[in-house]
């Protein structure tokens, strides 16, 4: 929210701003000064005030989130499948909103962690209107991508978006992502599941989905899951929703704001979400377990799975749970290729600077989240 624009372009109130001109009415050749020869105080623009207020709100939320225990219990969403036309239309505009930020973070993470950054076959679960699917297909230069979603209106919108971009390698289908038996083992180079785990009432269902993703992903492939994080208290959550959701209201996306509110209360905590990481992979040696590293910003530490023999661990898929420091705006679970240690095989972005998926007015927020994540 910005202050009323009561300042002129020079930074002074129109009624009090001193104006100095030359003999012929020309602008002065040196900076305007007061009668005492001092430079006048130029007030910051209303946009600067708004940025300062937003930063102060964010800092206070960080402090509140990190002082005290988790007390907010999970409240499942009133409607798990988005079929209402107003909600579908609102969700189709997400790339103009703050949701573009986690999409960019996720895409960058995938690009950095894949052994072969470009090409391959991908499966995107709970694809919605297809924006993240299309970002991956375009910037990772995928040979083929299949997007699945249970909502027919979402799939129809995603197909329309793909046609408008003339992306023939992308296909969207109505499908139940809890039933992936039709896909053979090791069918894909990349499987993704973004911003949808909180839709399910049971974390066990999410565990099963991730286990199936692991099964159908090739040993040299990547498994990527991203979702929201439930914050510590109701008050913190409501403040966070107002802060982030102001952009949704400003763009007339009231339905999306309401969905975001319910999603924040339905999200899993970082501690809960670690359960979705497969403890045993169908393709690991007998008796071996997945290796898990927990990453909070730049801090990392092994959590479990380091007790197996070296030969068994060499063929295991290593898992990373990434949670930004301070105020966790997202969390990611990444299963890297067998034998790979680390998430960052390369630097940079998969897109050129002129084609950044984050709108210009959100670049500062994007940079802040990147800094707290990596």
Image: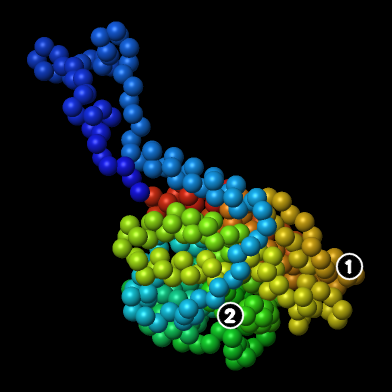
Q: Is residue 188 above or below residue 27?
A: below
In front here: 89 or 127? 89
The spot of residue 185 in percent (x, y) is 67, 85
Which residue is depicted at the point 35% across and 60% down?
Answer: 249
**Distance in Å between CA atoms under marks 2 and 1:** 33 Å
- Left or right of 267, for residue 78: left
Q: Is residue 347 above or below residue 35?
A: below
Q: Would you name the residue on which mark 2 appears?
A: 201
**Crowd class of label 1 (few under 14; some 14 to 19; many from 20; radius 10 Å):** few
Q: Is residue 372 visible?
A: no
The spot of residue 204 in percent (x, y) is 67, 80
In front here: 355 or 318? 318
In front here: 257 or 301? 257
Which residue is depicted at the point 46% across and 67% down?
Answer: 260
- Left or right of 336, for residue 122: left
Q: Is residue 289 visible?
A: yes
Q: Would you name the residue on which mark 1 appears?
A: 307
For numbered disc 1, what is the local secondary structure? loop
Which residue is depicted at the point 53% across and 87% down?
Answer: 176
Instruction: Indicate which disc residue 139 carries.
Output: none
If you read the primary sequence from the N terminus, does the residue marked by circle 2 or circle 1 appear first?
A: 2
Q: Judge depth for marks 2 and 1 and give the one in front.
A: 2
Answer with the quarter of the image where residue 278 lies.
bottom right
Which residue is depicted at the point 24% across and 36% down?
Answer: 6
Q: Residue furthest bottom?
A: 182
């Amino acid at each position: 929210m910005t202050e009323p624009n009561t300042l002129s372009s020079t930074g002074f109130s129109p009624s009090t701003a001193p104006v100095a001109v030359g003999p012929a009415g020309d602008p002065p050749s040196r900076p305007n000064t007061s009668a005492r020869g001092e430079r006048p105080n130029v007030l910051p623009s209303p946009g600067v005030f708004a940025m300062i207020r937003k930063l102060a709100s964010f800092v206070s939320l960080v402090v509140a989130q990190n002082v005290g225990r988790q007390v907010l219990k999970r409240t499942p969403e009133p409607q798990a499948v988005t079929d209402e036309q107003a909600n579908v239309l609102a969700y189709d505009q997400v790339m103009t909103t703050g949701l573009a930020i986690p999409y960019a973070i996720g895409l960058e993470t995938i690009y950095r962690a894949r052994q072969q950054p470009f090409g391959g076959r991908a499966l995107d679960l709970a694809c919605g209107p297809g924006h993240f699917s299309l970002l991956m297909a375009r910037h990772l230069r995928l040979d083929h991508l299949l997007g699945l979603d249970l909502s027919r209106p979402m799939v129809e919108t995603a197909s329309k978006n793909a046609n408008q971009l003339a992306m023939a390698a992308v296909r969207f289908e109505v499908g139940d992502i809890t039933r992936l038996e039709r896909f053979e083992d090791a069918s894909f180079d990349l499987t993704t599941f973004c911003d949808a785990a909180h839709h399910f009432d049971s974390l066990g269902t999410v565990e099963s989905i991730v286990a199936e993703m692991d099964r159908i992903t090739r040993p040299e492939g990547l498994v990527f899951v991203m979702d929201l994080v439930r914050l510590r208290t109701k008050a913190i959550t409501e403040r966070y929703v107002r802060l982030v959701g102001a952009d949704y209201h400003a763009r007339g996306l009231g339905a999306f704001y309401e969905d975001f509110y319910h999603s924040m209360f339905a999200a899993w905590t970082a501690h809960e979400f670690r359960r979705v990481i497969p403890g045993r992979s169908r393709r690991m040696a007998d008796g071996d377990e997945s290796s898990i590293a927990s990453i909070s910003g730049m801090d990392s530490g092994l959590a479990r799975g380091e007790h197996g023999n070296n030969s068994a661990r060499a063929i295991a898929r290593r898992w990373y749970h990434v949670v930004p420091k301070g105020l966790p705006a997202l969390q990611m679970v990444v299963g890297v290729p067998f034998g790979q240690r680390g998430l960052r095989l390369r630097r940079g972005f998969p897109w050129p600077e002129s084609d950044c998926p984050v709108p210009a007015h959100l670049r500062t927020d994007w940079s802040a989240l990147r800094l707290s994540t990596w």
